[in-house]
Image: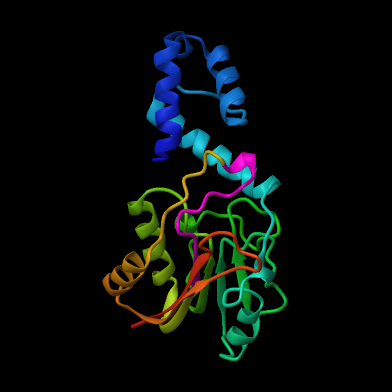
Amino acid sequence: MNTKIFNKLNQMVKDSPQLLLNTNALQQAISGEFCVDINPLNDIAELTNLIDEAVMKNYFSKVWQPETKKYKYSGLSIIDEVNSLNPDNVLDIGCGYNEFKGKIQNLTGIDPYNKRADVMVHTLEYETFTEYDVTICLGSINFGSTDKIINELQKAVSLTKTGGLLIFRANPGIQHKAFESQWIDFFDWNTAFIMNTASALNCTVVQLNRDMPTNALNGGRFYFVLRKN
């Protein structure tokens, strides 16, 4: 659950308890506070999830723009690195505008919000009989609670062949600058979580670096590669 949204909703209802008794007023309050239009529910927990999904969809379908070229390790150099493996199939989870399509061989891009994806679907809902030689997750497993992150990591590993590689860019909890991103719950990755989760998922850490974008004014991102044992 997105605690930022949940706590804000609780405060809104405490300040104005009539909101739960007036659907139109609640809808207007949500639109004004979170900049999304939804059909509200009276259950704050369920309402939190609805708003969270709407905020994510709005940001990643209308506002967010990729910055792939700015990264040393998880940028365009990935194209040659993956193609050098001559993979039979590659999965790009959270592919966004599907930038690697046509550049990385045998690639399928999935994304819940971008129409340029080959399949528009959330990570946990993606079903296939294919096991991938390489799975790419550049900033896509980075939102929500620890258990949600672990579930998505498990899914990514399950989609990858034994001996295959998983390539990640992960945000250490740095908030995006755009106003529309203010309610997104960015997960705060760290090296201990990367190492310990890799071990728990029966993967070997092949590479782990700080990936600093050009002209970075913050801590950048983590770049890491896992091999499924």
Examine the structure image and report whether residue 77 is included in the region drawn in magenta: no
Q: Is 73 drawn above or below residue 60 in the view shown?
A: below
Residue in the picture at 55% in, 72% down: 91
Which one is nearer the viewer's eye here, 177 or 65?
177
Total labels: the figure holds: 0
Q: How is the image coloured?
A: rainbow
Residue in the picture at 57% in, 85% down: 88
Residue in the picture at 47% in, 45% down: 185
Residue in the picture at 44% in, 25% down: 9
Q: Position of residue 108 (x, y in %)?
A: 61, 70
Q: Position of residue 71 (x, y in %)?
A: 62, 71
* Range shown magenta: 167-181
Left or right: 126 with respect to 205? Answer: right
**Viewer can see residue 38:** yes
Left or right: 67 with respect to 199? Answer: right
Left or right: 50 with respect to 197? Answer: right
Q: Position of residue 45 (x, y in %)?
A: 38, 30
Q: Quadrant of residue 74?
A: bottom right
